[in-house]
Image: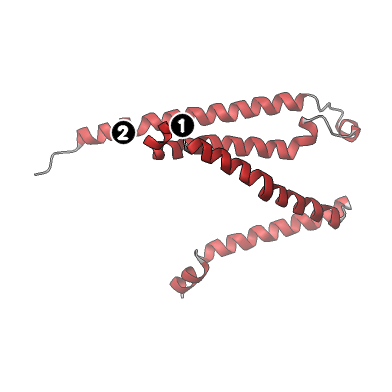
């Protein structure tokens, strides 16, 4: 039964339970959002569809083209595995930075209404600088991890090779 389920579903039963739990939490959050905020479902659905179309028609082709252009560099052709690892160290901070921008866009771009300042007593002006600092820190941390990983396997490989006894 377990192997048949795994073959049909593609993962174990625990994965399905996790996915269903996440969907339940998302449904609860959406329900509370409509109860508390009084938001119109048509507006939210319109935004969701518009953003999905913008992603599929604009952003996905743009970053796929950028990735393909990067992959054509002669140095990358000599070491595709190294490029694949390094590429992740660019994608992750870029994704996190874009997510921060998406969530805080009105504040970062100073397009929030006076409602934010009225409710919090704070200005939205520092958000751009803070987002830029957060983005720089994300890329710096990712670069440091990339350099550490590039150096660490070579050292550990040499150490393991030195400890190994020759076999006859």
* Residue at image point 60% right, 60% down: 19
Q: Is 45 placed left or right of 84 in the picture?
A: right
Q: Position of residue 49 (x, y in %)?
A: 76, 54
Q: Where 18 sits versus 166, above or below?
A: below
- Tell us which disc is closer to us: 1 or 2: 1
How far apart are the alpha carbons under marks 1 and 2? 16 Å
Numbered tag placed on residue 48 in the rendering: none
Task: Return the disc, 1 or 2, that comes first in the chain's sequence.
Answer: 1
User: Where on the picture, by quarter, is residue 20?
Assistant: bottom right
Q: Is 1 placed left or right of 95 in the picture?
A: left
Q: Nearer the viewer, residue 57 or 115?
A: 57
Q: Where 168 sits versus 16, above or below?
A: above
- The answer to the question of whether label 1 and label 2 lie on touching residues, with beta carbons closer than 8 A, is no
Judged from the image, the secondary structure of the residue bearing numbered disc 2 is: helix
Judged from the image, the secondary structure of the residue bearing numbered disc 1 is: helix
Q: Position of residue 121 (x, y in %)?
A: 87, 28
Q: Which residue is mark 1?
A: 146
Q: Residue furthest bottom?
A: 1
Q: Position of residue 136 (x, y in %)?
A: 61, 26
User: Where on the picture, by quarter, is residue 42?
Assistant: bottom right
Crowd tier of the residue under label 1, counting other residues whose Cα lies within 10 Å: few below 14, some 14–19, many 20 or above? some
Numbered tag placed on residue 156 in the rendering: 2
* Residue at image point 63% right, 46% down: 60
Q: Position of residue 141 (x, y in %)?
A: 53, 29
Crowd tier of the residue under label 2, counting other residues whose Cα lies within 10 Å: few below 14, some 14–19, many 20 or above? few
Q: Nearer the viewer, residue 78 or 101?
A: 78
Q: Where 35 sits versus 94, above or below?
A: below
* Residue at image point 40% right, 40% down: 81
């Amino acid at each position: 039964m377990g192997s048949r389920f795994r073959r049909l579903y593609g993962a174990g039963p625990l994965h399905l339970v996790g996915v269903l739990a996440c969907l339940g939490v998302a449904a609860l959050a959406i329900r509370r959002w409509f109860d508390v905020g009084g938001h119109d479902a048509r507006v939210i659905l319109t935004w969701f569809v518009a953003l999905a179309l913008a992603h599929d028609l604009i952003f996905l082709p743009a970053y796929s083209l950028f990735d393909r252009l990067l992959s054509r560099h002669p140095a990358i052709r000599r070491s595709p595995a190294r490029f694949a690892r390094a590429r992740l160290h660019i994608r992750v901070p870029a994704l996190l930075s874009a997510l921060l921008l998406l969530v805080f866009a009105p504040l970062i771009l100073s397009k929030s209404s006076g409602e934010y300042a009225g409710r919090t007593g704070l200005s939205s002006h520092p958000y751009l600088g803070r987002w830029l600092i957060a983005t720089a820190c994300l890329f710096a941390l990712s670069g440091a991890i990339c350099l550490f990983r590039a150096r660490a396997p070579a050292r550990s490989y040499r150490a393991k090779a030195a400890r190994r006894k020759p076999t006859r």
